[in-house]
């Protein structure tokens, strides 16, 4: 006869697994399996991160090389612009000295109209 009041539920007694292992062994094996899975996932994440880091490193190197090329191109173009400005000054002076000044000297002075 049951001596417990009806509000108290009885739990079934723990049964041993059929393979004879203890629950503590099962829990240990389950934890070890979860740790192996976590380690594999972690390794995959590290491998993926390393691949991305390598790719980004290569892209950075290519960008740095391109920047160097563009900086060299800027220097070359600035040098050309400076030379062009110098030539324009030479041409301006030649026009003034060879054309404008002699023409002005040969032109009769016009009377000032009031």
Image (cartoon, grey):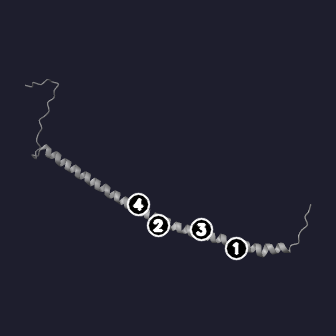
Judged by depth in the image, the label closer to the viewer, 4 or 3, is: 3
- Residue 65 image label: 2
Tag 2 or tag 3, which sits nearer the N-term?
2
Q: Is residue 99 above or below residue 114?
A: below
Looking at the image, is 89 positioned above or below residue 14?
below
Q: Compare marks 4 and 2 and give the one earlier in the sequence.
A: 4
**Measured Cα–Cα span from mark 3 to mark 2:** 20 Å
The quarter holding residue 4 reads top left
| Percent position of residue 91, x then y | 71, 73
Marks 4 and 1: which is nearer the front? Answer: 1
Secondary structure found at label 4: helix
Q: Residue furthest right?
A: 114
Residue to which mark 4 is pinned: 56
Query: Which label belongs to residue 61?
Result: none
Specify which label sits upstream in the sequence, 4 or 3.
4
Q: Which residue is mark 1?
A: 90
Task: Decide which of tag 4 and tag 1 comes sooner along the chain.
Answer: 4
User: Would you name the residue on which mark 3 appears?
Assistant: 78
Verify CB contact (< 8 Å) between mark 2 and mark 1.
no
Question: Closer to the N terminus: mark 1 or mark 3?
Answer: 3
Residue 47 in the image: x percent, y percent?
Answer: 32, 58
**Disc 3 to disc 2: CB gap under 8 Å:** no
Q: Are marks 4 and 3 in contact (CB under 8 Å)?
A: no
Q: Classify the position of the C terminus by image quarter.
A: bottom right
Disc 4 to disc 1, how far (Cα)?
A: 51 Å
Distance, label 4 to label 3, CA atoms, is 32 Å
């Amino acid at each position: 006869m049951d001596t417990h009041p009806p509000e108290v539920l009885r739990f079934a007694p723990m049964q041993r697994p059929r393979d004879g292992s203890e629950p503590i062994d099962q829990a240990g094996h389950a934890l070890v399996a979860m740790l192996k899975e976590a380690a594999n996932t972690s390794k995959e994440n590290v491998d993926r991160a390393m691949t991305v880091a390598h790719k980004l490193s290569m892209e950075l190197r290519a960008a740095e090389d391109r920047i160097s090329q563009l900086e060299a191109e800027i220097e070359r173009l600035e040098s050309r612009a400076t030379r062009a400005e110098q030539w324009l000054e030479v041409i301006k002076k030649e026009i003034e000295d060879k054309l404008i000044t002699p023409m002005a000297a040969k032109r009769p002075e016009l009377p000032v109209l009031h």
